[in-house]
Image (spheres, grey):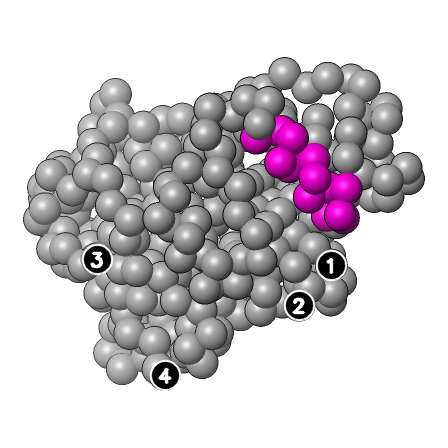
């Protein structure tokens, strides 16, 4: 079969022949893949830098996708095919507990595009932060696909107020029409950024969804400690690390605040809960209450599109 094949030492996959997946075993189903999105998880696993990687090479890229069960018209979303097989291929074999039906009203490309980025905030808010209706949410890094959806998801799940940070001024402006009550430009992530954040914490922020980590997350934590009223809890949920894997965390920021640090993602949330979150995202997309710009490309263009920057979510079709 044709697939996006990653060879040692990892990185950009090539459109090449790869062996067919084995016949389905007990509890497994064969899927004819119709769409697979390029996510940050897929990029980092292909580069060998994601904590969930298994180090099996060569392998097929892609952690999730949409397809049709062999011998039926059943459309499904699936996740985590067994290594070395991935979703960016013509075929996949998936455990029956790693898939769910795609609702009518959502096309294959949209389902593939929106599932993981939408799940990242949906699961963080429902499984980790336990968002209470009316609370205020800060999305740090809201101009990427996941952060942009996080603004919509927070509002959909009952946030009373949403504050968004990001570098892309045009997208920040668009977010004001998508559910953000206020936006803060990252700029050089300096004192001005921290002061503006502090004013929002003085008004009251209950949950932080962080897609960036690095310097901006450090400033968010300091602003939270300095601006939040004494004893008020803040749930800081770490989801992505687009700005870097580490930060300098001042101990005083923790001692002088009721900040609660937690992570959200694979292994911190069990797979059934992640699938429930994805089901919620797909149902919302079917109802027209969640949307994400999407660009569809043939899988044969995977190498040329892999590193290309785009505001739209890239989806490959075999």
Which residue is located at x 76 percent, y 48 percent? 204
In the rendered structure, the answer to whether residue 294 lies left or right of residue 101 reads left
Q: Which residue is mark 1?
A: 135
Task: Measure how far apart labels 4 and 3 are at the Cα level.
Answer: 20 Å
Residue appearing at x 16%, y 42% in the figure: 305
Start-end of magenta stretch? 193-205
**Residue 97 makes an appearance in the image:** no
Visible residue check, residue 48: yes
**Tag 1–tag 2 contact (CB < 8 Å):** yes
The correct choice, above or below, for 204 with respect to 223 in the image is below
In space, the residues marked 4 and 1 are separated at their CA atoms by: 32 Å
In terms of image quadrants, where is residue 10?
A: top left
Position of residue 179 relative to residue 251, above or below, is: below
Residue 281 place in picture, x, y as percent: 49, 67
The circle drawn on residue 158 is 2
Tell us which disc is closer to us: 4 or 1. Answer: 1
Residue of label 4: 104
Q: Secondary structure at mark 2?
A: loop
Dot placed on the residue nearer the N-terminal end, 4 or 3: 4
Circle nearer the viewer, 3 or 2: 2
Q: Nearer the viewer, residue 161 or 242?
A: 161
Q: Which residue is mark 3?
A: 295
Q: Is residue 229 left or right of residue 92?
A: right
Q: Is residue 204 left or right of residue 106?
A: right
Crowding at label 2, few (<14), some or many (≥20) Cα neighbours within 10 Å?
Answer: some
- Marks 3,2: beta carbons within 8 A: no
């Amino acid at each position: 079969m044709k697939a996006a094949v990653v060879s040692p030492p990892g990185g950009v996959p090539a459109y090449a022949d790869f062996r067919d997946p084995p016949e389905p075993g007990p509890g497994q189903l064969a899927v004819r893949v119709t769409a697979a999105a390029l996510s940050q998880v897929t990029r980092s696993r292909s580069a060998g830098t994601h904590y969930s990687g298994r180090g099996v090479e060569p392998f097929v890229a892609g952690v999730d996708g949409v397809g049709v069960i062999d011998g039926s018209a059943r459309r499904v979303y699936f996740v985590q095919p067994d290594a070395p097989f991935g979703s960016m291929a013509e075929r996949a074999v998936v455990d029956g507990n790693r898939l769910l039906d795609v609702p009518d009203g959502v096309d294959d490309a949209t389902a593939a595009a929106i599932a993981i980025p939408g799940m990242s905030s949906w699961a963080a808010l429902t499984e980790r932060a336990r968002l209470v209706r009316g609370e205020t949410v800060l999305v740090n890094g809201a101009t990427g696909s996941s952060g942009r959806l996080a603004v919509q998801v927070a509002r959909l799940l009952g946030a009373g107020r949403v504050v968004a940070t990001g570098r892309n001024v045009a997208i920040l402006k668009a977010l004001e029409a998508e559910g953000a009550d206020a936006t803060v430009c990252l700029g050089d992530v300096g004192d001005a950024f921290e002061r503006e954040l502090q004013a929002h914490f003085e008004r009251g922020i209950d949950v932080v969804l962080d897609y960036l980590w690095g310097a901006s997350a450090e400033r968010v934590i300091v602003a939270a400690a300095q601006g939040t009223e004494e004893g008020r809890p803040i749930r800081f949920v770490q989801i992505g690390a687009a700005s870097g894997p580490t930060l300098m965390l001042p101990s005083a920021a923790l001692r002088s605040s009721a900040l609660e640090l937690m992570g959200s993602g694979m292994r911190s949330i069990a797979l059934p809960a992640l699938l429930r979150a994805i089901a919620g995202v797909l149902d919302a997309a079917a109802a027209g209450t969640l949307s994400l710009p999407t660009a569809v490309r043939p899988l044969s263009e995977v190498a040329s599109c892999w590193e290309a920057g785009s505001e739209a979510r890239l989806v490959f079709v075999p």
